[in-house]
Image (spheres, helix red, strand yellow):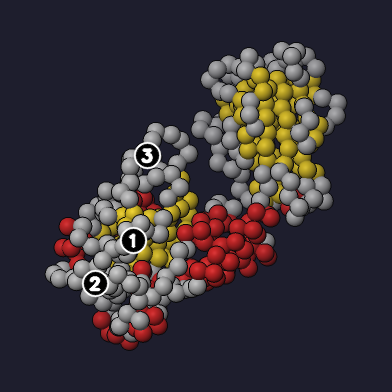
């Protein structure tokens, strides 16, 4: 890992950034390689204004991306392309990101360790940006947006860094020292003036909460307390690494205790038993006209909750099974060439009322049907239509249904 020896600045910040002559960290990230062609690409991304005391502009979230997209593409999506002032070469400002001069509060470390202007100086300097835009020369002549990837500074601009699956991307406003307030390193010195910890794991933990089920997560007292602490620690630029790590572990443990992993395995015509899928992944097939013949469902052991799962299927020639199967036992048949036509799934145990179980099936000649939940029927009866695929997911009670598969139409169940 190469130490970056910062050069004394001269000229205009924008000019230097456009030429790629300066970077905000003392350690450089490797230039990204294009992402291979695969599905399910995600990054964690946020936008931060901690150096002027305005907190997150955008809290950490998981973002999907497509092959070849850059940091600039994702920033444009997160902040809104219409709000970007400048270009992929250099962002001069982002509209709507300034919470106002009255909210500016410069952290002590910038004044005491980096010789930066204090809160009064920042307010006196002001922000000439239009449309409440933070950017070049906001609150000091040295202000501007920079970005970190996996806590390192790429040696290319936002428009040239091609994002990779699993990247943690932090778009951060620098008030003082052309990034020294983000990194602790002053230009011209190989040694840090301030030790600034790595918050990537903490950021990823916060992004786990910031989903469509956030409200349900924060209704849990343990998650709410850990989340609030994580937000507070994130905003402390000089937090000790031990405090950062402790906050990240506490938040992730609280989420894990509240999250339930559902695993399921299907027996497919001609293919036999597939490997287990989990949490909304597709088990079975679609587009191959192959019937599901059997299914096994279980929940990962979770000592925090008394929770199980039971299920029964509607089988060709046999109709609905007489009894529920549970916790990994076979429902349906094996070796009899009989199609599954519908399924019921429900949670069991003392804590079943704390969660909802959603499931969606792909049926012959229909495609993906609507979601069923908590014991409702999914599929068909009396139509002689095979089930071909299924998705199952457990979510906190009252949370929105998971995202429907492409092409979803109609009800969860049809009978004649």
Q: Earlier in the sequence, mark 1 or mark 2?
A: 1
Which residue is painted at 63% across and 14% down in the image?
Answer: 270
Disc 1 to disc 2: CB gap under 8 Å: no
Q: How crowded is mark 2: few (under 14 residues within 10 Å), some or many (20 or more)?
A: few
Can you say whether 116 is above or below 60 in the image? below
Q: Is residue 29 left or right of residue 311?
A: left
Circle number at residue 408: none
Residue 350 placed where, x, y %? 82, 51
The residue beneath circle 1 is 27
Who comes first in sequence, dot 3 or dot 2?
Answer: 3
Q: Mark 2 points at which residue?
A: 188
Q: Residue at the location (30% across, 49% down)?
A: 31
| Residue 100 visible from this viewpoint | no
> Is 91 located above or below residue 231 in the figure?
above
Instruction: Give the spatial CA distance, label 3 vs label 2.
Output: 35 Å
- Separation (CA) of disc 1 from disc 2: 14 Å
Residue 35 — which label? 3
Q: How far apart are marks 1 and 3 (CA)?
A: 23 Å
Which of discs 1 and 3 lies nearer the camera? The answer is: 1
Q: Which of 385 and 255 is in front in this view?
A: 255
Give coordinates of residue 167: x percent, y percent.
42, 50
Q: Quadrant of the N terminus?
A: bottom left
Indicate the position of residue 100 as horizontal and vertical percent values: 36, 75
**Residue at x 27%, y 55% (from the top left corner):** 155
């Amino acid at each position: 890992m190469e130490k970056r020896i910062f050069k004394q600045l001269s000229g205009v910040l924008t000019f230097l950034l456009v030429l790629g002559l300066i970077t905000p960290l003392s350690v450089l990230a490797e230039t990204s390689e294009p992402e291979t062609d695969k599905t399910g690409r995600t990054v964690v991304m946020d936008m931060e204004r901690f150096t002027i005391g305005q907190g997150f502009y955008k809290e950490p979230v998981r973002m999907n991306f497509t092959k070849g997209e850059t940091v600039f593409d994702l920033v444009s999506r997160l902040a809104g392309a219409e709000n970007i002032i400048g270009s992929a070469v250099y962002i001069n400002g982002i509209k709507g990101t300034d919470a106002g001069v009255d909210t500016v509060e410069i952290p002590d470390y910038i004044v005491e360790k980096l010789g930066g202007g204090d809160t009064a100086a920042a307010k006196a300097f002001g922000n000439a940006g239009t449309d409440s835009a933070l950017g070049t020369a906001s609150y000091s002549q040295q202000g501007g947006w920079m970005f970190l990837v996996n806590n390192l500074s790429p040696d290319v601009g936002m428009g040239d860094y091609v994002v990779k699956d699993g990247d943690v991307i932090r778009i951060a406003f620098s008030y003082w020292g052309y990034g020294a307030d983000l990194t602790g390193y002053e230009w011209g010195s190989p040694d840090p003036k301030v030790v600034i910890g790595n918050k990537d794991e903490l950021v990823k933990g916060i992004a786990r909460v910031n989903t469509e089920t956030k409200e349900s997560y924060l209704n849990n007292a343990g998650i709410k307390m850990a989340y609030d602490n994580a937000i507070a620690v994130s905003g402390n630029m000089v937090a000790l690494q031990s405090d950062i790590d402790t906050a990240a572990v506490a938040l992730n443990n609280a989420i894990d205790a509240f999250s339930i992993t559902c695993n399921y395995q299907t027996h497919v015509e001609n293919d036999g038993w597939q490997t287990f899928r989990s949490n909304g992944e597709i088990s079975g097939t679609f587009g191959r006209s192959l019937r599901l013949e059997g299914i096994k469902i279980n929940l990962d052991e979770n000592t925090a909750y008394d929770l199980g799962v039971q299920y029964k299927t509607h089988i060709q020639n046999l109709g609905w099974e007489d009894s529920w199967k549970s916790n990994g036992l076979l429902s349906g048949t094996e070796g009899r060439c009989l199609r599954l036509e519908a399924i019921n799934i429900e949670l069991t145990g003392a804590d079943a009322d704390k969660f909802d179980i959603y499931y969606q099936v792909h049926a012959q000649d229909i495609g993906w049907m609507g979601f069923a939940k908590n014991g409702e029927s999914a599929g068909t009866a009396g139509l002689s239509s095979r089930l071909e695929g299924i998705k199952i997911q457990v979510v906190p009670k009252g949370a929105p249904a998971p995202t429907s598969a492409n092409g979803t139409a109609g009800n969860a169940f049809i009978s004649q």
